Image (cartoon, grey):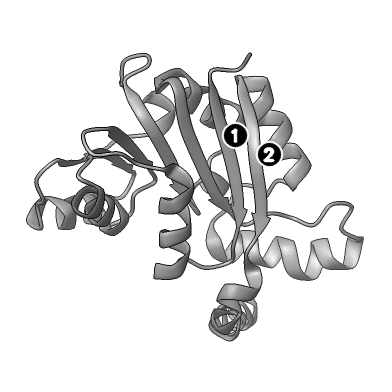
Amino acid sequence: MPSSTAETLWSPWLNLPLTDTVSDRLRLMPGETGVDIGCGYGSTARLLAVTHRVRVTGFTLSAEQAHYAAAHPVPDVDIHLRDWLVNGLTDASANAAWAIESSEHMVDKPRFFAEAHRVLSRGGRFVVCAWLAKTDAGDWKVRHLLEPICREGRLPSMGTREEYEAMAMAAGFAIAGYEEVSRRVAPTWPIRARRLVKAELLR
């Protein structure tokens, strides 16, 4: 049997209700160790560390984000300027891991899942919140929606739900659930649309 479970939440934008949903899925207990993959400025890591009394290690590729996190320290939160795919964590060293809109930026997505499974202890939980491409999207949507989103967001690719689940299971995870939460964050779509239009006009 797989030693850990994974869930996927699909959302086009990060917001506090989404973070709360991720937190609920993680079922964090005081004293546990968590990993924030693609932690950004560390907001989610700090929030979960404080509210759940857990130790969190975060990873970001942005020197600016790492500098900000270092300037705003919180007990039990350690932010690293390091590539998740070469994270340096020991095997089975974490109880939970999460990736909020960071997996899309991974060139090697199978390795993204494999590293998460490696660092999680038996019974560990992994929650992924990601932009996902629609299964069997037509040529028009690929050209006029998916490709512009990838260009504007600097995403090497967006996988489908089925591709994500296949990669997670290949890494050793058991899929615990999937939820599309786009409607909860629909108010942010006009913001993203304006950015996409501006980016396309400037090309």
Give the mark nearer the N terminus: 2 vs 1.
Answer: 1
Residue 75 drawn at (x, y percent):
9, 45
List the residue tagged with mark 2.
164
Contact check, label 2 and label 1, Cβ < 8 Å: yes
Q: Quadrant of residue 192?
A: bottom right
Residue 152 drawn at (x, y percent):
57, 66
Looking at the rendering, in which quadrant would you find the C terminus? bottom right
Q: Is residue 15 visible?
A: no
Instruction: Indicate whether 111 appears above or below 7.
Output: above
Does 162 sit left or right of 195 as displayed?
right
Looking at the rendering, in which quadrant would you find the N terminus? top right
Q: Is residue 118 visible?
A: yes
Instruction: Classify mark 1: helix, strand or loop.
Output: helix
Residue mark closest to the camera, 2 vs 1: 2
Residue 27 drawn at (x, y percent):
41, 43
Residue 118 drawn at (x, y percent):
45, 18
List the residue tagged with mark 1.
109
Instruction: Say which amino acid is labelled 2.
Output: Tyr
Does 166 sit left or right of 7 as displayed?
right
Instruction: Say which amino acid is labelled 1.
Output: Lys
Instruction: Classify mark 2: helix, strand or loop.
Output: helix
Does 46 sit left or right of 147 as displayed?
left
Instruction: Kindly identify the residue that appears in the image at 39 percent across and 46 percent down.
Output: 38
For label 1, the crowd category at 10 Å Cα-Cα, with few meaning under 14, some 14 to 19 and many 20 or more, is: many
